[in-house]
Image (cartoon, helix red, strand yellow):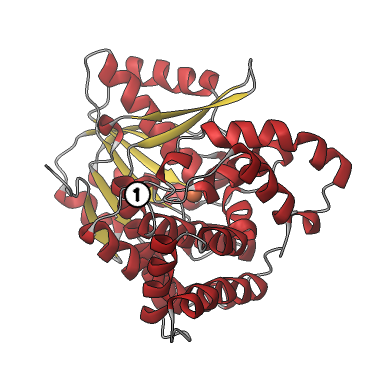
Amino acid sequence: MKIFQADTQIFAGIDTEKVLEKISCKKYIFMTDPMMVKIGISKKIEEIFQRKGIEYEVFSDIEVNPSLESIKKALEKVIDFSPEKILALGGGSTLDSAKAVSYFMAKSGREIPVIAIPTTCGTGSEVTSYAVITDTVNNVKIPIKDDKMIPEIAILDPEFTKTLPKSVVADGGIDALTHAIEAYTSKGANLYTQIYSLYAIKTIFKNLLKMYEDISNKEARIEMGKASCIAGFSFEKAGLGINHSIAHNIGGKFHKAHGRANGVVLPYIIKFNSTDEETAKRYYEIAKELELPSSSIEEGAKSLAIAVEILNKKLGIQSCVKEFGIDEKEYRDLIPEMAEVAMNDICTSGNIKNVTIEDMKKLFEIVY
Ligand SMILES: [Fe+2]
């Protein structure tokens, strides 16, 4: 049985130009989002292409929640231009769009590998086989998962994260932490994925606040880039759990950032899952690694929940859903629907503790 294989070549803390020099590709489609164009970051890539005499075209019509229509537009451009590779520079939405284009191209018999340069530290999309596309006609999110979408190369260049706003640092960082904690405690976890998860958890606890408080801290940006990427590896292989299932619903229904929704519910989920013996033991192992009070399994699990609560507070992340300013009646009316969708979320099956629909409804109440 194959239990682990890293599929993406990773270049961390290195200048993008030096990496691109090593790649033999003469024709790129360069996918990025309007914000990157507006603040001039995408220009840095274009200048590299121009200096090297590389042929390229830009596609920057990327939406925050990429729709099928926008993927179609990108596909048309790719088919017209016929590039050798896709270079994607941006956050999760941009990387997901590029991966989706690569997926549909592969379906039609033409493989166009993706080089991913994340400009946020969080999603891990630069190494995963997932992309989320929105069907705006039926208003549903379509997750696609296919190994063909795993980027060929990821470049973690701190140059591209040095102007991130505080809220984006917090949302991304706590998303990465949720990936690592959920992956460590998931059904699909094994020794190899857990080593990755633990490294990510420790690195995030050590560097996220530093990056949040001072974005000019290059070392913290490099470390967070590596940690979120490694957390991506661990959940790619091990899966996630109900934290993501619940956050997907709250984020989707009330238009809250994915990472933030994860961070808000994380302490509650740790407490809920701690009633399962195996999961509690794994929280305890994490707490021990973090040198938190952990004289018993119970104390260790509790310490981890408290450590996340403290981290959330320092990052300006709400301590409950109510603090988002969401109307209580509107929220409660949606609980049955959200609970049902969360039960069917792909992440729920990764949770070790068995969850009933009643548990799920209760959890939506507790996190409020
Ligand atoms: Fe996530």
Whether residue 202 is visible to the viewer of this picture, yes or no, is no
Comparing 68 with 90, the one in front is: 68
Left or right, 270 with reference to 150 = right
- Return the x and y of residue 78 as percentages of the image width and height: 35, 21
**Residue farthest along the left direction in this orientation:** 1
The residue shown at (22%, 47%) is 8
Label 1 amino acid? Lys
Of residues 203 and 101, which is closer to you in this image? 203
**Residue beneath label 1, please?**
187
Can you name the residue that lies furthest to the top here?
Answer: 108
The percent position of residue 196, horizontal first and vertical second, equals 28, 62
Q: Residue at x 32, y 59 (%)?
A: 230
Vertical placement of 123 versus 97: above or below?
below
Q: Is residue 5 above or below residue 263?
A: above
Residue positioned 40% across, 19% down in the render: 75
Disc 1: CA contacts within 10 A as few (<14), some (14-19) or many (>=20): some
In-front residue for pair 33/315 = 315
Looking at the rendered structure, the secondary structure element under dot 1 is loop
Q: Is residue 47 left or right of residue 325?
A: left
Of the 4 image quadrants, the one containing the N terminus is top left
Q: Viewed as shown, does residue 331 lie left or right of 241? A: right
In percent of width and height, residue 19 lies at 22, 54
Q: Quadrant of residue 350?
A: top left
| Residue 139 located left or right of residue 56 | right
x and y, in percent, of residue 322 in the image: 80, 55
